[in-house]
Amino acid sequence: MSAGIDRLAAYVPQYALPLEELARARGVPPEKLTQGLGVEEMAVPAPCEDVVTLGATAGARVLQAAGVDPREIGMLVVATETAVDHAKPVGIFIHELLGIGPRCRVYEVKHACYAGTAALMAAADWVRAGGPRGRRALVIAADVARYPLGSPGEPTQGAGAVAMLVGRDPRALILGEETGVHARQVWDFWRPLDRREAVVDGKFSVECYLDALGAAFAAYRALERPALQRDEVLSDRLARVLYHTPFPKMAAKAHRRLLEVDLRATHARWTAAEADFERVVAESFAEQVAPGLGAIRRIGNAYTASLYLCLAGLLEAEGRRLGARRIGLFSYGSGSCAEFFGGLVPASVVEAGDAGLARMLAARTRIGVDEYERLVAAAESGGDAPPGFGGAFVFRGVRRDRREYAPIEREAA
Ligand code: CAA
C-alpha cells in the first residue's frame, strides 16, 4: 500500500522586503545577497500573525482544496521551532481553529528545520499501520526565522507554512519507505529559551549541513533497490532533488556535495567527471535543483517549512512534467538530524499540485526597510488584520495569560 502526501497547501505572509533594499540599508553590496546568498525577497509577517495563524491558514486551505471534512483527520502534527508556549502545543490551537474532531492525536515536533520531515515520516508510518482503514493525517510545518538585525543571518530570514494531507494512494507524492538518516550533536544553530532570535555559528552550520548531507545520502544510496549497477549513480535515477534551503546558494553547495559523494562511489564515473567537475555540477544543478528554488528565493528561510515550500513550488511549476518520475528530498535540522528520502510524483499530481503559492506571492505588498523594522519590533503583538491581509486567522493578543485567536470571517462580521 502506498502512503504519502495527497495534497499540500502553503501560506506565506503578505509583506515582502526586497533584499536589495536591505543590502543598501546595511551597507552591503546587493549582489552579495542576491547572488552570493541567492535571495531576492524576504517574507515578513504582520503583527497579528504567529506560527499558529500561519499554520492554521495553510491547514484550512489544504482541507478546503481537498474537500476533506476536518473530522476525518485522525492525527495532527505541527512541526515548528517557533512555538508559542513551553507546554501547550501549537497544534491544539490549530485543532480548534480548523474544527478537527476529538478523535485525533495532536502533538508538536521540534528538531530545528528537520521537524517537518520527522512529522511527515511519523504520519506516513501511522497511515501505513492503518492499512485499508484509510487513515488521514494533517502535517503542518510552520516557522518564522529570526536573527538579530544587522547580523549575517538577517538576510536569510523568512516565514511561511505548508500543510500536507497525508494518506493512502496519495496524489501529490508517494513516499519511498527507505530513507537515509544521520544524527550528531553539534552547536551550529540554536535558540535558548529566553531568546527570540537564533544563535548561530554560520560558517560552521554550513559545514555541518554538508557533512550531514554526505552521510545521509550515502546511507540512502546503500539501501537503493534495485541495487545500482557498478558504474551507475543514484542521482541519474532522480528527476529533481530538493534541499532544505536556508538560502538558495546553500542548495547549490548541497548539490555539489551530493554529486561528489555519488560519483566518487563509482570509479569510472568519477574519473570521467573529475577534470570538468564544476561544469558537471552546474549542468546538473540547472536541471535537477534550480526548478525547485523559484518560490524560496522570494520567501527566505522558513526553517522547517523550507523544504516543503520547495516541494510546493516545484509541483506547481512542473507537476505535469514530473508525473510518474522520482524525486529526492534532503532535510537538515541543526543540532543535528538529517534525512534523505525519495518520492514518486504520481501522474495524478496535476490535480493535486497547486499549493496556491504562485498566486500568493504575486499578491504580496512590497515594503521598505523602515516598515520591515517596525514590523520586527511589533512582531506577535497581536491585533486586527491589516488591509490586504491574506490569512484566514488572526492572533488577537494575550489576555489572562491566554493567547487568543479568531477566524478572519468572524472579524469581519
Ligand atoms: N557579490 C557576489 N557574491 C558575494 C559578494 C558580492 N559582492 N560578496 C560576498 N559574496 C558571496 C561569498 O563569496 C559567499 O559565497 P560562497 O559561500 O559561495 O563563497 C556568499 O556571498 C556569502 O558570503 P559570506 O560567506 O561572506 O557571508 P556571511 O559571512 O555574511 O554569512 C552565512 C553567510 C554564514 C550563511 C550567514 O548568512 C548565516 O549565518 N546564515 C544563517 C545560518 C544558515 O543559514 N546556515 C545554513 C546551514 S544550517 C541550516 O540550514 C539550518 C537553518 O536553516 C538555519
Image (cartoon, rainbow, N blue to C red):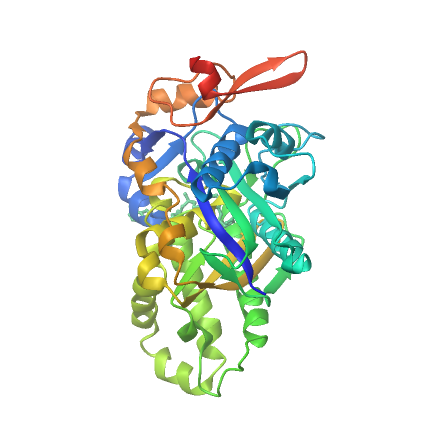
Q: Relative to 394, is 184 above or below?
A: below
Q: Which residue lies furthest to the right in this view?
A: 87
Residue 412 location, x and y as percent?
Answer: 42, 14
- In the picture, measured across the screen, residue 239 lies left or right of residue 112, that is left
Q: In which quarter of the image is the N terminus?
A: bottom right
Residue at image location 67% in from the left, 15% down from the top: 401
Q: Relative to 213, is 145 above or below?
A: above
Q: Nearer the viewer, residue 25 or 272?
A: 272
Q: Can residue 39 be seen in this view?
A: no
Residue 123 location, x and y as percent?
Answer: 62, 51
Q: Is residue 163 visible?
A: yes
Residue 254 location, x and y as percent?
Answer: 44, 60
Q: In which quarter of the image is residue 127?
A: bottom right
Q: Relative to 9, is 180 above or below?
A: below
- In the picture, measured across the screen, residue 276 lies left or right of residue 212, that is left
Q: Relative to 295, is 363 above or below?
A: above
Q: Quadrant of the C terminus?
A: top left
Residue at image location 39% in from the left, 38% down from the top: 155
Residue 237 location, x and y as percent?
Answer: 42, 74
Q: Which of 284 and 342 is in front in this view?
A: 342
Residue at image location 61% in from the left, 19% down from the top: 403
Counting the numbered discs, the total is 0
Q: Nearer the viewer, residue 399 or 28?
A: 399
